[in-house]
Amino acid sequence: MAADATPGSGRPAAAPRRPTGRDVARLAGVSQATVSLVFSGSQTGHRVSEATRQRVLEAAGGLGYRPQAAGRQLRLGRSGMILLAVPNILGPFFGRVLTGVHEEAGRYGLAVVVSSGWGSATLAEVAGTSRFDGLLICSPDDSQLGELPADTPVVFLDADPDADRTRPTVELDVAGGMRDAVGHLAVLGHRRIGHLRSIHSAHTFRVRQQAFERVAGELGLDVLELGVSLNEGQAAARAAAHELLGRADRPHAVVCDDDVVASGVYQAAAELGLRIPADVSVVGIDNIPVAGLLAPPLTTVDLPGEELGRVGLAALAGLLRGEPFSPVAPLATGLVVRSSTAGAVG
C-alpha cells in the first residue's frame, strides 16, 4: 500500500520520527548519560536511584522509546534474551505469567523465549551458553531442578525457596489460597469434601496438598481424594470426577487443584445428571480466563500470574544490572466467589 501523500505536495508523508534517548532525557529531566545507564543493564561505578530509574522508564514508555538493542548488547557481551521455562506451555496459568513477563521485559529492552517441559540437564546446558542472559524458571517440577552454572542469573517463580538458597525465588501464597477455598465450603456448611489433587511432583502442588490436609483436619471435615494428571488435561479430570461423583457416598463439594480440573468436574456432573451448585459445589484454583465463562461461573482462587511474571522479570533485570535481590513476601492470592458454590443441603 502506498504511503499517504503530504497534503498539497504530491509527496509521500514522512515516517514519524523515532524517539531518541535525548527525548527521554528531556522528558524525564535527567542527562542522556543517566538514560544510557538505566537501559545499559549495568551501573558499575555509578548509582541511579530507583525513583530516577522509574522516571526514565515511564518517560520512555510514554514516548514509545526502544533503545537500539543490537549495539548495546554487543558492547555488553549479551544477547538481550531471557528464557522463561515452564513445565507445560498448554497450562492456561502460564499464559498469565508470560503476559506479565512480556510486559515487564519491554521496559528493559529484553526479549522473551519460552520453553516447555525442559528437564534439568537441558536447562543446565542452555544456561551454560551465551544464548540467554538469564533464566526465569516457573512452577518447576522435580525433573526440572538440578545444578545450574553459578554465574548464570536465575530467578525461580512459584517454587521452593529452600531448593536453591543462592538464587531468588518469588513465591505465591498458594497455601493461603487453599485455606480460603476449603474454608469457604466449610462456612457454607459442607462437611464432606472431595479433593481432586495433582499427582505431579512439584513444590506448588505439595504446598496445596499440605494446606488442604491441614485445614480439613483443623475443621474436622470428612475428605475423599483422588489424584489427577494435569498434563492429560480435561479428559483425565473428567474421568477422576466421574469416579468421585459416581460414588454412593459422594461428596457434595469438590476442591480442584486447578481450573482445568474444575472444568472436568462440570462435564462429569452434567453427564451424571448433577447440578452445580444445587447438587455439588465446585471450587478451582488459578482463575484462568475461562473460569468466568463456565456455566455457572466458577468460584476459584486467583493466583496473580501476571504479577508473578512482572516481579520475577524485574528481579532478573536487577541481577543483570549487578544489584542484590531484596526478598519479597509471597504474592497474595484471593478467593473469587462466583456461582459454583452454595450452602449444603440436608
Image (cartoon, rainbow, N blue to C red):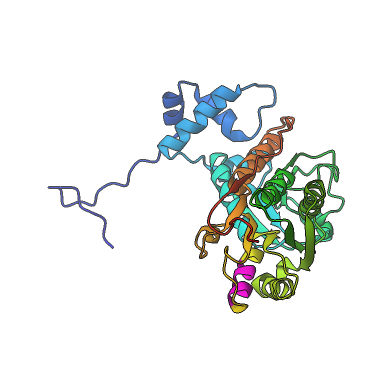
Q: Residue at x 41, y 30 (%)?
A: 23
Instruction: Tell me if residue 261 comes above or below residue 315 in the rendering.
Output: below
Is residue 74 in sight in this rendering? no
Seen from the viewer's position, the closer of residues 336 and 339 is 339
Q: Position of residue 220 (x, y in %)?
A: 80, 50
Magenta span includes 84? no
Q: Where is residue 70 in the image (x, y as percent from the top left)?
A: 57, 46
Q: Residue at x 71, y 73 (%)?
A: 236
Q: Residue at x 43, y 40 (%)?
A: 64
Q: Which residue lies furthest to the front in this view?
A: 346
Q: Where is residue 155 in the image (x, y as percent from the top left)?
A: 73, 43
Is residue 1 in sight in this rendering? yes
Q: Report whether 268 appears left or right of 251.
A: left
Seen from the viewer's position, the closer of residues 116 and 139 is 139
* Secondary structure mostly seen in the magenta stretch: helix
Quarter of the image holding residue 89? bottom right
Q: Which residue lies furthest to the bottom in this view?
A: 271
Seen from the viewer's position, the closer of residues 10 and 192 is 192
Quarter of the image holding residue 344? bottom right
Instruction: Tell me if residue 107 comes above or below residue 2 in the rendering.
Output: above
Numbered range of the magenta stretch? 263-270
Seen from the viewer's position, the closer of residues 320 and 240 is 240
Count the marks: how many? 0
Magenta span includes 269? yes
Q: In which quarter of the image is the N terminus?
A: bottom left
Q: Report whether 223 appears left or right of 7.
A: right
Q: Quadrant of the C terminus?
A: bottom right
